[in-house]
Image: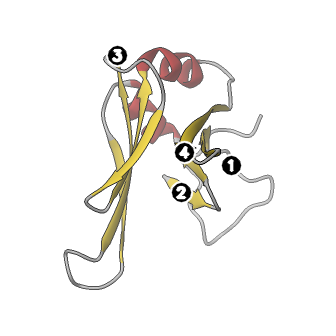
Amino acid sequence: MKLRIRGDSLRFRLTQSEASKLAGKIKVSESVHFSSSPNDVLTYSLEASDLVTGISALIQSGEILVRLPESLVQPWFSTDQVGIEHDQPIGSGRTLHILIEKDFQCLEARPEEDQADNFPHP
């Protein structure tokens, strides 16, 4: 899973196996380690559940967690729908833009990057 952070925006890109896990209500996570200290880690996660009614993002204890309703994940995973988007109000007239997308194979080969698990380019 890839995460791009830009301003008040989070963009997640998932491979086929990660999207399959999310569709199966299995939490998908990655971590970035900044040193050998266990406290210097940033984890980012996506979680689908039939218990949530809307998309929400939060950060706590070094983890960015986005929760999605299963009812949005299933059609995204099983159709040609590319992404799921949401704007979460964060106060003071600002919003956090959240985008979850399928990670497609590049049109040009990148020998340094394994794209075998990426979605076929449409």
Structural distance between the alpha carbons of marks 1 and 4 = 37 Å
Labels 1 and 4: the sequence-earlier one: 4
Name the N-terminal-most of marks 3 and 1. Answer: 3
Mark 3 vs mark 2, CA separation in Å: 24 Å
> Which callout, 3 or 4, points to the residue nearer the camera?
4
Asked if the residue under mark 1 is in contact with the one under mark 3, i.e. CB atoms within 8 Å, the reply is: no
Position of residue 88 measured from the top left corner of the image (x, y, whole percent): 56, 37
Q: Position of residue 50 (x, y in %)?
A: 34, 16
The kind of residue on which mark 4 rests is Gly
Q: CA distance from mark 3 to mark 1?
A: 30 Å
| Residue at mark 4 | 91
Asked if labels 4 and 2 touch by Cβ distance under 8 angstroms, the answer is no
Q: Along the horizontal axis of the image, is 61 left or right of 4?
A: left
Q: Find disc 2 in the rendering and name its residue.
A: 3
Residue at 58 percent of width and 23 percent of height: 76
Query: Residue 50: which numbered mark, if any?
Result: 3
- Labels 3 and 2: the sequence-earlier one: 2
Q: Quadrant of residue 26?
A: top left
User: Residue at coordinates 53% horizontally, 46% vertically from top-left?
Assistant: 117
Q: Tag 4 or tag 3, which sits nearer the N-term?
A: 3
Residue tagged 1: 105
In the rendered image, residue 33, in percent from the top left (x then y), is placed at 34, 75
User: How are the residues colored?
Assistant: secondary structure
Horizontal relation, residue 61 to residue 67: left or right = left
Compute the Cα span from label 2 to label 4. Answer: 23 Å
**Circle 4: is it few (<14), some (14-19), or many (20+) Cα within 10 Å?**
few
What whole-number distance in Å separates the C-alpha atoms at marks 1 and 2?
A: 16 Å
Q: Secondary structure at mark 3?
A: loop
Instruction: From the image, state whether disc 1 or disc 4 is nearer to you.
Output: 4
Please tell me which residue is depicted at 80% across the width and 52% down the height of the picture.
Answer: 107
